């Protein structure tokens, strides 16, 4: 067993001490595989646990790791799901190319990728399928299981039927309900990253041999390599019955006196395809920009959700719907305005006709014309009676 490490890596104002180790245990072949060499370039760390026969299990694990690394930088939860799907398709395609030897192969897989979001927060984008676990330990000693196993035994723990440490010895602990190469969809999660925290990825060979609190104790050791060696010794002492793999990441404050390696990715201000800085360029430059932007990923504006090809269509439909809604609202407003204008015209005409009727002279029958008042009974005007003739003066009777 050899501990593999890319050396301490400075990024985002912190130092990442990364190391990994794997052993075959009692098996004829180690079907586990891990990668830490992609961390300086992509911020990527992954552990795969193969299944499907002696040769097929290792092929599945290696194929999955290659596919994840080839899927491009993982800077969002959608990108993590895309990378796992790419690994699933690659394993299934490889198995189909040689069914006699590789049919049915697959693997459990856990991947974490270091990113900085738009708000400046640093964290891991984590994705997992199967029973490879991701664990974190905070400076206050709290050990957290960040992922879930896709097994019937883990489901029993979630239901409160068994204790967490009883999972390895419970029925269904070795039966994967999801696997890469068999259409298994990944669970994804954001895990905050801060100086003083330690993270561990490990296969189920470690789960079967060590309790969660024991793993937390090894994560307090002064280096990631020492933690890997301690896990290996403990598993060997207890007699492993499977391959086992552990990758440890300790996050330290960026000590100005230390000389950790700097990543050689594009500078934080460069865009994809832009100029690359040399390995020596970052040694003497101020660390303020590195702490703000980091060295493992492009600028914050590039830390986005992977866009679907249907996104443009959806955007176009949304714009069209807004346009139609606006047109409908405008048409309705215009119709209401026209109706109000019509009602105002009718009312004005009625007032004019009422005024006209009051000024017309009576007709020969002493009536106003019926049309003078719309909808009203004709008004009757009675003429004054003719004056009586004057009486003749009375002549006094003659005597």
Image: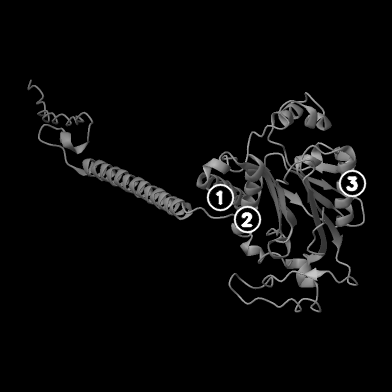
| Badge 1 or badge 2: first in the primary sequence | 2
**Residue 267 sits in quarter:** bottom right
Please report the residue visible at 64 percent of the width from the left and 73 percent of the height from the top.
270
Mark-to-mark CA distance, 1 and 2: 9 Å
Please report the residue visible at 66 percent of the width from the left and 42 percent of the height from the top.
54
**Callout 3–callout 2 Cβ contact below 8 Å:** no
Q: Nearer the viewer, residue 26 or 10?
A: 26
Position of 238 relative to 79 (above/below): above
| Residue for badge 3 | 233
**Callout 1–callout 2 Cβ contact below 8 Å:** yes
Please report the residue visible at 89 percent of the width from the left and 70 percent of the height from the top.
258
Mark-to-mark CA distance, 1 and 3: 35 Å
Can the viewer see residue 186?
Answer: no
Crowd tier of the residue under label 2, counting other residues whose Cα lies within 10 Å: few below 14, some 14–19, many 20 or above: some
Is 64 left, or right, of 255 in this rendering? left
Q: For marks 3 and 2, give the one nearer the viewer.
A: 3
| Residue for badge 2 | 66
| Residue for badge 1 | 90
Q: Nearer the viewer, residue 368 or 256?
A: 256
Mark-to-mark CA distance, 3 and 2: 29 Å
| Badge 1 or badge 3: first in the primary sequence | 1
**Residue 176 sits in quarter:** top right
Q: For marks 1 and 3, give the one nearer the viewer.
A: 3
Q: Nearer the viewer, residue 42 or 146?
A: 42
Q: Nearer the viewer, residue 21 or 317?
A: 21
Position of 274 relative to 170 (above/below): below
| Badge 3 or badge 2: first in the primary sequence | 2
Image position, residue 24 (x, y; %): 77, 45
Image position, residue 77 (x, y; %): 64, 50
Crowd tier of the residue under label 3, counting other residues whose Cα lies within 10 Å: few below 14, some 14–19, many 20 or above: few
């Amino acid at each position: 067993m050899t501990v593999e490490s890319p050396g301490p890596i400075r990024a985002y104002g912190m130092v990442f001490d990364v190391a990994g180790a794997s052993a075959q245990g009692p098996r004829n072949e180690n079907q586990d595989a891990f990668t830490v060499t992609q961390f300086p370039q992509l911020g990527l760390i992954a552990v795969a646990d193969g299944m499907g026969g002696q040769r097929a299990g290792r092929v599945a694990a290696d194929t999955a790791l290659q596919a994840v690394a080839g899927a491009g930088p993982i800077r969002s939860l959608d990108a993590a799901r895309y990378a796992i799907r790419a690994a699933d398709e690659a394993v299934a395609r490889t198995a189909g190319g040689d069914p006699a030897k590789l049919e049915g192969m697959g693997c459990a897989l856990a991947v974490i990728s270091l990113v900085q979001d738009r708000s400046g927060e640093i964290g891991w984008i984590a994705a997992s399928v199967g029973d490879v676990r991701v664990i974190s330990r905070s400076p206050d000693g709290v050990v957290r299981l960040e992922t879930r196993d896709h097994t019937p035994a883990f489901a029993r723990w979630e239901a409160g039927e068994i204790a967490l440490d009883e999972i390895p010895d419970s029925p269904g602990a070795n039966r994967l309900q999801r696997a890469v190469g068999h259409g298994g969809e990944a669970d994804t999660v954001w895990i905050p990253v801060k100086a003083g925290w330690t993270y561990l990825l490990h296969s189920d060979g470690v789960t079967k041999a060590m309790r969660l609190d024991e793993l937390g104790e090894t994560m307090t050791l002064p280096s990631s390599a020492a933690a890997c060696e301690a896990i290996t010794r403990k598993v060997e002492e207890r007699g492993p019955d499977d391959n086992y793999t552990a990758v440890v990441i300790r996050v330290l404050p960026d000590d100005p006196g230390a000389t950790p390696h700097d990543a050689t990715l594009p500078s934080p201000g460069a865009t994809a395809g832009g100029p690359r800085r040399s390995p020596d360029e970052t040694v003497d430059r101020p660390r303020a920009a590195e702490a703000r932007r980091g060295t493992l990923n492009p600028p914050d504006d590039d830390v986005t959700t992977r866009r679907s090809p249907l996104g443009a269509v959806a955007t176009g439909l949304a714009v069209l719907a807004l346009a139609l809604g606006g047109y409908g609202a405008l048409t309705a407003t215009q119709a209401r305005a026209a109706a109000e204008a019509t009602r105002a015209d009718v009312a004005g005409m009625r007032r004019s006709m009422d005024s006209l009727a009051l000024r017309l002279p009576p007709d020969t029958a002493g009536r106003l014309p019926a049309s003078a008042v719309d909808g009203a009974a004709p008004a009757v005007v009675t003429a004054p009676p003719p004056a009586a003739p004057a009486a003749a003066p009375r002549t006094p009777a003659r005597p």
